[in-house]
Amino acid sequence: MEHHPLLWVSVIPGLNLLPGHAATALVVTGVLILFAYYANRQLAGAPDPVVPDDSLTLRNIAEYLTEAVSSMAESVLGHHGRDYVHLYGSFFLFILCANLFGLLPGFSPPTSNFNVTLALGVLSFVAYNYYGFREQGMGYLKHFVGPIWWLGILMVPLELIDNFVRPFSLGLRLFGNMTGDHVVLEIFTDLTKVVVPVVFYVLGAFVSLVQAFVFTLLSLVYVSLAVSHGEHH
């Protein structure tokens, strides 16, 4: 089956020098930067920032997404959840937007490339370990030993394997689901052309949302595991 993921990015000077997934990821990043810029301008120009706009605006969309991620973070981390919204909200928005780009003709979702999803998984891995050390200092290493010190000889290897597998499991889950979704959409679009693909576009949008949610939620769970030892949860 012939693919056409590079149709648009291959004609943009500069981007055509990059691999397709990297070029599309940069386009997604640029779209999100513009979205944040104009949403912030609308918020700054509002007569009362506390009162939402009457109509659907970029500001309203940004506030809704921020509130959704905040609720997710607080459900996992409690009242400290809002401290992590800036990073994990960025995860959610980037992954969601990157997934949805796969529904646009001439684009392939960057998340259907394992290099991109593994990079996201590694960033999540670095982030939760950073938050663990920030919360507990060197005491963070104690949870690798387990509750009983003499079990450390068994627990440390298991904990290390568990932690180092996490970025790969995050990356593989996102990569596999988005690759499968994109292939199915292309197959049915090529076969039926009209009407039937609409169903798969709706399904693809739903899968895009779910996968962004799952990646963000699992990343927040890892943060909770990393910082909760210091709070005796």
Image (spheres, rainbow, N blue to C red):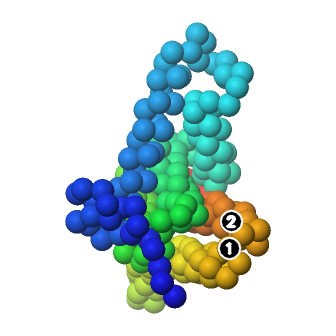
Is residue 104 placed above or below 33 in the rendered structure? below
User: Disc 2 or 1, which lies upstream in sequence?
Assistant: 1
Q: Nearer the viewer, residue 102 or 134?
A: 102
User: Residue 124: percent from the left, percent from the top?
Assistant: 43, 63
- Number of residues whose C-alpha sits closer than 10 Å to that of mark 2, classed few (under 14), some (14–19) or many (20 or more): some
Residue at 47% in and 23% down: 41
Q: Nearer the viewer, mark 2 or mark 1?
A: 1
Residue at 67% in and 22% down: 53
Residue at 77% in and 68% down: 195
Q: Work out whether residue 97 can be spotted.
A: yes
Say which quadrant the C terminus sits in: bottom right
Residue at 52% in and 51% down: 93
Name the residue type under label 1: Lys
Q: Tell me the CA gap for discs 2 and 1.
A: 12 Å
Please give the residue where the numbered disc 2 appears in the rendered image: 201
Please give the residue where the numbered disc 1 appears in the rendered image: 193
Name the residue type under label 2: Tyr
- Number of residues whose C-alpha sits closer than 10 Å to that of mark 1, classed few (under 14), some (14–19) or many (20 or more): few
Element under disc 2: helix
User: Residue 11: percent from the left, percent from the top?
Assistant: 31, 61
User: Residue 17: percent from the left, percent from the top?
Assistant: 22, 66
